Image (cartoon, grey):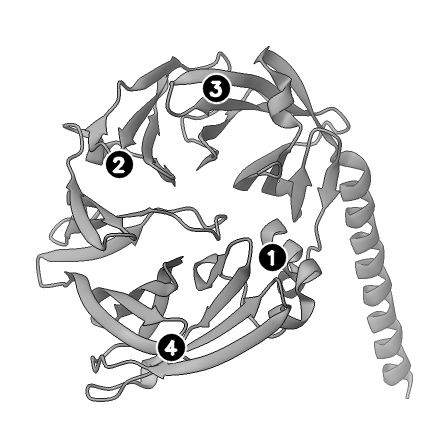
Amino acid sequence: MKKYWQLLLTVGVIVVALSVHYIQIVNAKNTDYNFSFETISGDDSYLDSLVIEANIEYGMGYGSILISEEETTLMDSSYYNRKSLQFQKLIDEHKSFMRGKVFIANNYFEDDTKLVYVKEPEEGWKVDGGDTYSYEVDVLDKVKDEKTSFAIKSQLKNRFNWVFYSDITIVDNELKLLVKQVDNNGSEKMYHVIIDLKEQQLLSETLLEEATMDESTRTSIDSYNTYSHLGHEKYHIYSVNAFDLKKPEQDIISRQFRAFNTETNEVTAIQLPEGLEQKLQSVVVDNNYLVIAYSTNTEKVFHRYNIGQQRWLEPITVPQQIGLKNNELNGTSAQNGKLYVMNEVDNDYVLQIYDIEKGTLLYEGKLSNNNTKQKYNIWVSNFYDLKE
């Protein structure tokens, strides 16, 4: 009996200690992490509608925060309750429709009148050659607040282990999907699928790209459109990459970029400037522009490509700030004609906002946390312009 009570006492002490530790962490997060911007140059009105979603590491703690010009908001730290700003907005506005859905941006499309969700096939890894799966579609009429659901069986009968969506959009009442199938052997296929929303009929499933692997080379398909944009995008940018399996580092052999026009269903090759494929650290897409960036100890370079005109603009070259911690880009995003870039400088972070088309610097400012002397690190996951 004595050992029993000793065990209960020990467990009780552990629980109390963990509770106190957790409370201390929560209190530290609530009091120590309040960020503010200090303008270096440019127009600070660009901060009025900007929200930065980021992960933060502080001592032994780790969490997610929303940073705006006015305040810093701590998000729910539990994995299962953590939602990005865009999905929290969808839940607040369409709670019933969003119930039971996964929070993956590539599964959604939204405009002023409708919200569309396409569910990824369950247990795709069980599909063998000759079997198939269905496209399960939910459509919310935002004007009438009415939901319509239907399922359409795919005609593809490939062997694969996973299937997921790289892009969803709607053009002239046609639901267009970029569907990627991946097999355990490393092979990938990307299809363009068109569904008539009104008639709820499958119109076509067209193979766009295929990536394979052999003893010496591995190929893959990567997409670059932003996860924070749920509306229509005319162009979907992707690349087919080849890697050398004979080398331990699996060095890149080639990276072939393509632009898929979602309105005309045409694929156009994008020729990179010489040497750029070996340097790129960030690839972002905004409407008619592709921006490829890299950073060195002395400069940041942004290559801009006008997709519609199929031409490269003059690169933007910016000297690095004094006190640069490392030459990795901490966070980049392109939206609404603006390019957002974050770098760690000294013990703070510097935010720069560029006009993509003109190549001019609109704003530069230091993001600081004056409430703590404790070392912290920030990794930006999204930039949101709430005005748009």
Mark 1 vs mark 3: give the one in front: 1
Residue 282 placement (x, y as % from top left): 36, 36
Residue at point 25%, 31% (across, down): 279
Asked if residue 118 can be seen in this view, the reply is yes
351 lies above or below 137: above
Q: Which mark is residue 324?
A: 3
Mark 4 → mark 1, Cα distance in angstroms = 29 Å
Q: Residues within 10 Å of mark 1 (few under 14, many from 20)?
A: some
| Image location (x, y in percent) of residue 278 | 21, 34
Q: Residue at x 70, y 28 (%)?
A: 69
Q: Residue type at mark 3: give it.
A: Leu
Q: Quadrant of the C terminus?
A: top right
Q: CA distance from mark 4 to mark 3?
A: 57 Å
Callout 2 environment at 10 Å: few (<14), some (14 to 19), or many (20+)?
Answer: many
Numbered disc 1: secondary structure = helix
Q: Badge 4: few (under 14), some or many (20 or more) residues near its Cα, within 10 Å?
A: few
Q: Which mark is residue 87?
A: 1
Inspect the image, locate mark 1, and give the three-letter code of the amino acid beneath it.
Answer: Phe
Per the image, label 3 sits on a secondary structure element best described as: loop
- Of the two numbered discs 4 and 2 on the same chain, state the one appearing first in sequence: 4
Q: Position of residue 129 (x, y in %)?
A: 19, 86
- Label 4 or label 3, whichever comes before in sequence order: 4
